[in-house]
Amino acid sequence: MKPTIARKEQVSAMFNNIAKKYDFLNHFLSAGIDRLWRRKLVARLLREKPNLVLDVATGTGDLAIELAKRSRACITGVDIAQAMLDIGKTKIEKRGLEKQISLQWADSEALPFDSETFDAAMVAFGVRNFEDLHQGLSEICRVLKNGGTVAVLEFSRPKAFPFKQLYDFYFKNILPLMGRMVSKDPSAYSYLPESVYHFPDGQAFLDHLKQAGFDQTEQKRLSLGIATLYTAKKVSDTIRA
Ligand SMILES: C[S@@+](CC[C@H](N)C(=O)[O-])C[C@H]1O[C@@H](n2cnc3c(N)ncnc32)[C@H](O)[C@@H]1O
C-alpha cells in the first residue's frame, strides 16, 4: 500500500478536474480578494529585486502573471496538474508573456532544478496541498540561492469574535455548497475547508519554515486573518554549518 502517492494523485486529479472553473471560482468565492492578496505578495517580493523566480504550485499562473506585469523577472512555474498548466499557458500567450514565464510539470517535493538556482520563490495557496510539507519547503530552500527569499501566501484562520464565527459558517457551509454547484466536483470544495483547518498557520507555519532551513521569518495577516503572507530567507550554508 502506498498511501502517499495515492494522496498526491488525488490532489492532481482534483485540480485537473476543476481546472476550467478554477479561475472563476477563485475570484467568485473570495469576492475578488484573492487578486489583492497576490498583489501584496508580489509587492513584497519586488523589494528583493529578484531576476530568477520560481512559482511553486503555479496552477493557472495568476501569481506568475502578476509578477511578470510588474517586473522584468524571468519566472518558472511548476505544478502537478497538467490541465491547470494548460490553462495557464493559454493565459500567458494571450498576454504575450511567454518570453518571461515558462510553465512545466513538476512536483514541488522533488524539484527538477539544481541547488541555488533561483533568487526568489513564491507559493500562493499551494503549500497546504503538499503531501509532505517539510520535504516541499526543504526543496524550495535547496533551489534558492543563499540569502534568497521565499514568499508564501496561504489561508489562515481568523481569531477575533464575531468575524471568526462568521468566517467559520461561510467556509464550512456556504463555500463548499457553491463550489460543488459550480464545479460539479463533490469533493473539491469540501477539501478546501478541511485542508485549511488542518494546516499549521501563524507561528506554527513559521516554525516549519525554520526547520526547512529558512531564517528571518515574518508573517503578515491579511483581511482580518483569512490569509497570511509569510516571508523568509534562506540561511547561507556556511552560517548553517
Ligand atoms: C489552490 S491551487 C493554487 C494555484 C495558484 N498558485 C493560485 O494562486 O491560484 C493549488 C495548486 O497546487 C498544485 N499542487 C499541489 N501539490 C503540488 C505539488 N506537490 N507540486 C506541485 N504542485 C502542486 C495543484 O495542482 C494546484 O494547481
Image (tube, grey):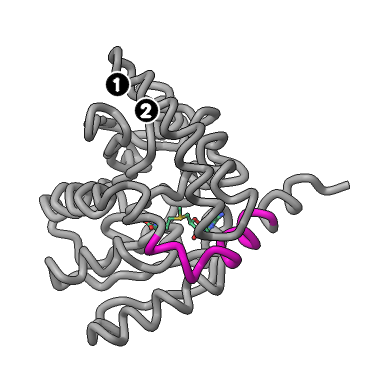
Q: How many marks?
A: 2
- Identify the residue under disc 2: 167
As drawn, the label of residue 128 is none
Contact between marks 1 and 2 (CB within 8 A): the answer is yes
Q: Secondary structure at mark 1?
A: helix
Q: Residue at x 36, y 63 (%)?
A: 117
Highlighted magenta segment, given as a residue range: 10-24
**Prevailing secondary structure class for the magenta stretch in the rendered image:** helix
Residue 148 in sight in this render:
no
* Neighbour tally class for label 1: few under 14, some 14-19, many 20 plus, Cα within 10 Å: some
Amino acid type, residue under disc 2 in the picture: Tyr
Q: Residue at x 28, y 50 (%)?
A: 34
Q: Which mark is residue 163?
A: 1
- Look at the image and say whether residue 20 sits in the magenta stretch: yes
Residue at 27%, 66% in the rendered image: 52
Mark 2 Cβ and ligand 1 under 8 Å apart: no
The extreme right residue here reads 1
206 on left or right of 38: right
172 relative to 184, above or below: above
| Mark 2 residue element | helix
The verdict on residue 185 being magenta is: no
Q: Is residue 39 above or below residue 17?
A: above
> How many neighbours does mark 2 have within 10 angstroms: few (below 14), some (14-19), or many (20 or more)?
some
Callout 1, which amino acid?
A: Phe
Q: Percent x, y for residue 77?
A: 40, 68
Picture coordinates of residue 187, whole percent (x, y): 64, 49
Residue 90 image offset from top left, x and y in percent: 38, 83
Q: Is residue 187 visible?
A: yes
Q: In the current view of this chain or complex, which residue is farthest to the top?
A: 161
Query: Where residue 214 sits in the image (x, y, percent)?
Result: 36, 36
Q: Quadrant of the C terminus?
A: top left
